[in-house]
Amino acid sequence: MASSLATAPAAVREMQSDLESQANALSKIQKDISKNHEVRKQFTIQVGENELVLKELELLNEGANVYKLIGPVLVKQDNAEAKANIKKRIEYITAELERMDRALKDLEEKQNSKKESLFGVRERL
């Protein structure tokens, strides 16, 4: 009987330690999800801006001058080349958004898993 009383506080401390580590892991996952949302927001803004630029380039006449800002200098650029660059940029950012979506889905699954295990540890206490 005395040995079961001595092991009970140790078991409770172990469960509390497990609960704390699970909570810390859940907190880290939630921070990663928040960071993912911020990056996604920036990418979404960039896609919108680039699509707007592409629409503006489509409105130009074939002989219109297009300039690209490189550092402090405006450099003349071919209209077709400018459109191609913008389309590549949109493709790249869209691919990054898709990658971020997959990462977000994975993080949300991990978060749900951690929540379930956290509730399981709480119930044991």
Image (cartoon, rainbow, N blue to C red):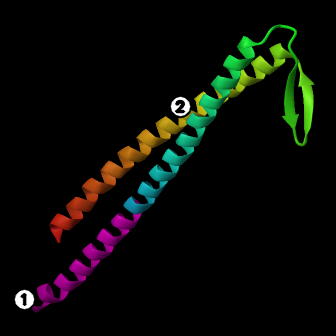
37 over 7 or under it: above or below: above
How many numbered tags mark residues here?
A: 2
In the image, taking residue 58 as reference, residue 115 lies left or right, namely left
Q: Residue at x 16, y 67 (%)?
A: 124
Q: Quadrant of residue 78?
A: top right
Question: Helix, strand, or loop for circle 1?
Answer: loop
Q: Quadrant of residue 25?
A: bottom left
Q: Which range is magenta?
A: 1-25
In the image, taking residue 24 as reference, residue 49 lies left or right, namely right
In the image, taking residue 90 as reference, residue 120 lies left or right, namely left
Residue type marked 1: Met
Residue type marked 2: Glu
Q: Position of residue 117 (x, y in %)?
A: 27, 57
**Camera-side residue: 79 or 8?**
79
Q: Residue at x 55, y 34 (%)?
A: 97
Residue under numbered circle 1? 1
Q: Position of residue 75 (x, y in %)?
A: 92, 29
Question: Helix, strand, or loop for circle 2?
Answer: helix
Residue occupying the far bottom of the picture: 2
Q: Label 1: how many residues lie within 10 Å, few (<14), some (14-19) or many (20+)?
A: few
Is 2 contained in the magenta span?
yes
Is 3 contained in the magenta span?
yes
Q: Residue at x 11, y 92 (%)?
A: 2
**Camera-side residue: 125 or 72?**
72
Residue under numbered circle 2? 98
